[in-house]
Amino acid sequence: MTTKAEIEQWLRRDDRNPVFLVEVNVRAGGAEVTRYLSNRPYVTGPAEVPANTAYLPYISGGVKAAERLALDGFDGPATSGSVSVATASFALANADGRLDGWLADVWANRQIRVFVGDSRWLRSQFYLLFDGIVADLDPTDRGELTLRMLDKLQRLNAPLSEAKLTSGQNKDALIPQVLGECHNVEPLLVSEATHNYAVNPYQCERLIEVRDNGAPVSFTPQLANSQFTLNQSPAGQITASVQGDRQGGTYAKDAAGIVQRLVTMFGKASERFTAADLDAANLMAFAAANPQMIGLYVKDRMNVLEACRQVAASVGAQILMSRAGLLRLVRLALPPAGQARVIKPADYKEGSLRPKARSTVRAGVKVGYCRNWTQQTNLQTGIPEAHKTLYAQEWLVATASDAGVATQYRLHSDPEQEDTLLQTRAEAQAEADRRLALWKVPRHVYQMQCNASFLTLELGEPVTVYNSRFGLAGGKTGLVVGIESDWLNGEAMVEVLI
């Protein structure tokens, strides 16, 4: 397989003869088959994989992809940490109706991979541009079909778990989920007769404490199935503080660890990711840079993708898929981490660089942390008044502000709260300080139409942009937040946050 550096060098050559190869799985005639498509004739040799295979030259145009990070905090307080799913499509020529029968096949949710290379290359030399799933095959008009693609994050649109109690008065009730460390969650009553409760469907790391109407009580833990039994009859509402899921004998409490656990151990078994779907280097580096303690409690239905988004957003990050179909975590931060790729005026169409958006300056950030998952008001037990106050509120709060920015921009000093899954004051304060530093100055998104060698850019990649205008003469380093790739015409519309 050609390396990224080699394909970028080839894309800069004037004598290149590009070919796009598409390998797509589809259910046709009651069987799962692979169809091989291209934009021009291409046949593999007898020693190649796949061997002696003709790629049908049906691709007529529209070979485009779009991907974009959600700029949480750009126009105000951060929200859910959602990321736009990468999309791609291409048109198939069908003027003579030869592909009409394909509309009766099942295309949705099948794997699709797109490669680029030179018509003179062996199949093994082609570079992987996109690894995702099919959204569907649609008739565009009488003479054309459109094959639409999505990245593999769509596989995570499945419930975390559907494990339910099989007996008792709460039969068929969904068993709650705990990942990381959570405080004062409401367990599910398993047996009123034996005072048995469940906090997780699977093995957990630790049951820290159990409380009855806010007062600590004696209990017997059963970590293997994340249940406990009260050693006395309950007097009121039972809550517990828990270090959660420990499937496979390991426990995760940081964002990278919990995300990996979510995508490989939860959701529909057939759609779960494996180690081959993870960018191991990215996740290892992210874990080292972001060790903050996270806690997520799920009492009702939630899908895996939403859980991952909440976890990542708590440290200002987003989940996304690389071009090679590997899951990554990218933190919205300036300056971005890593070695920056240089984008000079010769690398983009003259006059195409422009400021696309400007951020709203913020003078303060308020971060909610250490969520109390079961609010309890008017507790009458003999616990200290400070504890009663604590159990009545949902969030602890860390605040960062800049009086100078508030005065200069005439802003209000009381910001809207941004809730996170962070657990400790120090880590919440550090995140509030980081978000304030990021957004207390104007930030800009610059857009430019880059040449073909930048078709390999990835979201979250650091780049240094040069231009004679907009204060970029000496170059400024930013984060790639949007890419619209026109693979057939060899152009990439790139958006950079600086």
Image (cartoon, helix red, strand yellow):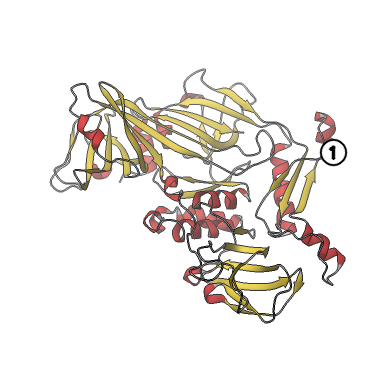
User: Is 381 drawn above or below residue 278 in the view shown?
Assistant: below
Residue 266 place in picture, x, y as percent: 46, 59
Measuring 38% from the left and 42% from the top, which residue is drawn there?
A: 4
Q: Name the element at disc 1.
A: helix
Residue 272 place in picture, x, y as percent: 41, 56
Judge left or right: residue 262 versus residue 75. left
Measuring 56% from the left and 71% from the top, which residue is drawn there?
A: 204
Residue placed most toward the observer, 194 or 129 = 194
User: Is 461 drawn above or below residue 198 in the view shown?
Assistant: above
Residue 110 place in picture, x, y as percent: 32, 45
Which amino acid is tagged 1?
Ala
Measuring 25% from the left and 29% from the top, which residue is drawn there?
A: 39
Residue 457 location, quadrant: top left
Judge left or right: residue 281 versus residue 292. left
How many marks the image carries: the answer is 1
Judge left or right: residue 467 versus residue 118. right
**Viewer can see residue 57:** no
Residue 306 place in picture, x, y as percent: 54, 49
Residue lying at the far top of the rendered structure: 351
Residue tagged 1: 403
Residue 369 location, quadrant: bottom right
